[in-house]
Amino acid sequence: MRRVVFPEAKKAVMTECEPPKCGDGQVLLKMRRVGVCGTDIQVFSGRNRFMTFPIVPFHEGIGTAVEVGKDVTDVKVGDTICVRPIIACHNCYPCRHGHVNACENFNSLGVQSNGLGSEYFAIDAEYCPRVSPDLPLDEAILIEPFAVGVHAARRGQVEGKKVLVVGAGTIGNFVAQAAQLLGAEKVAVCDLSEEKVEMARKAGIALPIVSAGKTLREVAAEAFGPEPADVIIDCVGAKPLFQQILDAAAKTSTVVIVGNYSENVELNVAQIQRNELNFLGNITYTRDDFETAIRLFEERKVYVEDFISARFSIEQIQEGMDQAVAGKAHNMKTIFDY
Ligand SMILES: [Zn+2]
Ligand SMILES: [Zn+2]
């Protein structure tokens, strides 16, 4: 079978190897689509702190179950599966308290272990939620990043709140959509890129704002007038923005950090203390968030039209990754098709 490998930074090659065996309790998937996430771009560029080369990339994937192992009851051959790609140990303290997304042995496919960039992939059935066969594959491939949005909106307890989402890429857009679907009072989303803000407008986000030339404090004032944002959700993860987020946060605001910071940031801790700010980390999603994401997709509540900004065959892996990196500021989602 064909399998993508990143042997070193900025290199992607197609290799041949034996397909995996379907073990007891496992499902053998024939992969149909994989999506490129910000994390994959970090991995490809050699800027991810949690992985080592060589690696088989990708954690966003849709496959068809082609074989099910002994004791698998929830999945049948032919089912469409949207892989839930965070493998938890179920033993550590966070896992035992229901926070499998914060597992001490956190293992994300395509980062800490080999990912879905493989023609066939065998995985435990618990990570194989089914999606309706009526849902187009090009929509289903967006469920995983949307689940991140569901988790972030829940972390921020957005119901009835004024929410400012910083960054309008795929994750920012999905966080904003999830916040609206989960009952936020007003949602603003900002980005330097006009294309991304336009996409947020098309997705029905109430207050899409181009932030070029403005501070986040000014953006928040433009969105909500004299009233502050109750919740700010950082979907960028860029060092120079962090102080601006702190400055835009009103007293007692909540800040949810979704973006992946690849550098440390120096903080004015007194500003956090005196303003009674709530800082919340955020990593991936729980099983429940993922199920909610699937349900919202099946109910066609999520706007995904034109989200796929580039499509390549898996054979074009080098070209596709190079373009995903080059177009990072403007692209939404790049996918590879098997
Ligand atoms: Zn992702
Ligand atoms: Zn664990």
Image (cartoon, rainbow, N blue to C red):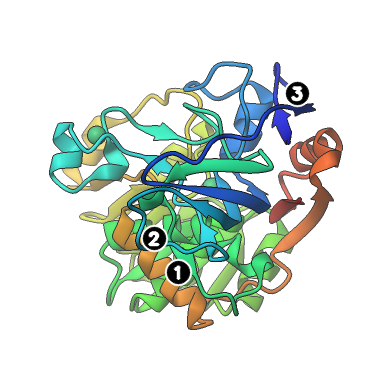
Report whether 247 appears left or right of 167. Answer: left
What residue is rendered at 26% in x and 38% in y?
271
Q: What's the residue at 61%, 69% (across, down)?
A: 200
Residue 260 falls left or right of residue 90: right
Residue for badge 1: 294
Callout 2 amino acid = Phe
Q: x, y percentage for residue 13?
A: 79, 26
Q: Amino acid at mark 3?
A: Lys
| Residue neighbourhood size for the residue with mark 3, other residues' Cα within 10 Å, grouped as few (<14), some (14–19), many (≥20) | some
Name above or below for residue 71 compared with residue 110: below
Q: Is residue 317 left or right of residue 328?
A: right
Q: Are marks 1 and 3 in contact (CB under 8 Å)?
A: no
Residue of label 2: 290
Earlier residue among tags 3 and 2: 3
Number of marks drawn: 3
**Of the residues tagged 3 and 2, which is closer to the observer?**
2
Residue 29 percent location from the top left of the image: 57, 50
Label 1: which secondary element? helix
Asked whether 138 or 249 is in front, the reply is 138
Q: Nearer the viewer, residue 258 or 162?
A: 258
Which residue is depicted at the point 46% across and 65% down?
A: 130
Kindly tell me whether mark 1's CB lies below 8 Å from ligand 1: no
Q: Give the amino acid type for the residue marked by disc 1 in the picture.
A: Ile
Mark 1 and mark 2: Cα distance apart in space: 6 Å
- Image spot of residue 266 (x, y percent): 38, 24
Residue where numbered disc 3 is placed: 10
Decide which of 95, 165 is in the foreground and name it. 95
